[in-house]
Image: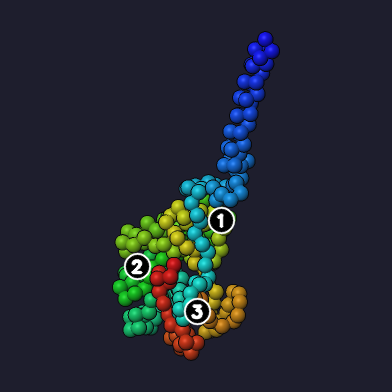
């Protein structure tokens, strides 16, 4: 009689204990809503602005310098600064692997010229459709600017750019999400800038060129003098495509 009286209670106790064990095991793999579990990779989250694309995908890096032991620097040009005839001749003669960031409304009328530069080694990349400042725009607007230029360059040159330079060098997290959704793998800024007076300025760090520096050239006619400076530092120009 005593065994029969307590047998149901013992069964219930075992069931409760088993349930507790199972719940404890599950707790190792599920954290609070929206929070990654310690030791597990983050699965995305609220990055601000409108949502778009796959939230679990990594965002493209923002770079102004490439980590490399090669003694190379990278020359980049925006919009229509590359249309100087002397610059074109220099690129053709030396087959310089420069990177040209093109805006459709600025460079579009001269796309034939840029096709010629591409044929001798220049890389054509994305500088948006209309050169609007991206930071602060909603996701849809930023995506239209970036993807729109991807489409333009793809249809004109048969290429799909993978690098983006945001106009004025300004961006936000929404820019990175939109860029990723448009197929961009890196957002490219610059550590050094050659201004119209021929002077190099730097956004950070030591005020001289180092291997891996990305240089923005504002005045294409100053390129030959810049090449002399680069040579004196024991550096050479390389293709950004080969490193990013």
What mark, if any, has residue 173 been given in the picture? 1
Q: Which residue is at a point 45% across and 74% down the rendered structure image?
A: 76
Q: Is residue 79 above or below residue 3?
A: below
Identify the residue at horizontal 61%, vertical 74% (top origin): 204
Residue 139 position, x and y percent, is 52, 50
Report the front residue among 31 and 208. 31
Q: Does 18 sit left or right of 109 as displayed?
A: right
Q: Picture coordinates of residue 212 (x, y %)?
A: 49, 76
The residue beneath circle 2 is 111
**Tag 1 near tag 3, CB within 8 Å:** no
Q: Count up the numbered dots.
A: 3
Side (left or right) of 54 relative to 31? left
**Disc on the earlier residue, 1 or 3:** 1
Task: Please tell me whether mark 2 or mark 1 is closer to you in this view.
Answer: 1
Q: Quadrant of the C terminus?
A: bottom left
- Classify mark 2: helix, strand or loop: helix
Picture disc at residue 211: 3
Badge 1 marks a residue whose secondary structure is helix
Q: Residue at x 56, y 83 (%)?
A: 208
Q: Could you classify mark 2 by the number of other residues whose Cα lies within 10 Å: few (under 14), some (14-19), or many (20 or more)?
A: some
Q: Label 2 vs label 3: CA separation? A: 32 Å
Ranked by sequence position, the earlier of labels 2 and 1 is: 2
Label 2 or label 3, whichever lies nearer to me, is: 3
Residue 221, by quadrant, is: bottom left
CA neighbours of label 3 inside 10 A, class few (<14), some (14 to 19), many (20+):
many
């Amino acid at each position: 009689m005593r065994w029969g009286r307590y047998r149901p209670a013992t069964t219930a106790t075992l069931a409760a204990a088993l349930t507790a064990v199972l719940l404890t095991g599950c707790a190792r793999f599920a954290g609070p809503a929206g929070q990654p579990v310690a030791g597990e990779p983050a699965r995305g989250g609220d990055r601000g602005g409108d949502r778009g694309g796959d939230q679990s995908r990594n965002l493209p890096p923002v770079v102004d310098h490439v980590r490399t032991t090669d003694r190379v620097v990278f020359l980049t040009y925006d919009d229509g600064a590359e249309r100087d005839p002397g610059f074109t001749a220099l690129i053709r003669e030396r087959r310089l692997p420069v990177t040209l960031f093109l805006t459709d409304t600025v460079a579009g009328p001269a796309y034939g010229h840029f096709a010629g530069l591409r044929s001798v080694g220049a890389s054509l990349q994305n500088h948006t459709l209309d050169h609007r400042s991206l930071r602060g725009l909603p996701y849809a607007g930023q995506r239209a600017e970036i993807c729109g230029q991807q489409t333009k360059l793809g249809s004109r040159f048969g290429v799909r750019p993978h690098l983006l330079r945001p106009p004025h060098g300004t961006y936000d997290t929404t820019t990175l999400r939109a860029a990723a959704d448009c197929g961009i793998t890196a957002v490219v800024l610059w550590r050094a800038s050659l201004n119209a007076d021929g002077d190099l300025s730097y956004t950070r760090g030591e005020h001289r060129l180092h291997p891996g520096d990305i240089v923005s050239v504002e005045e294409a006619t100053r390129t030959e003098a810049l090449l002399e400076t680069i040579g004196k530092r024991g550096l050479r120009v390389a293709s950004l495509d080969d490193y990013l």
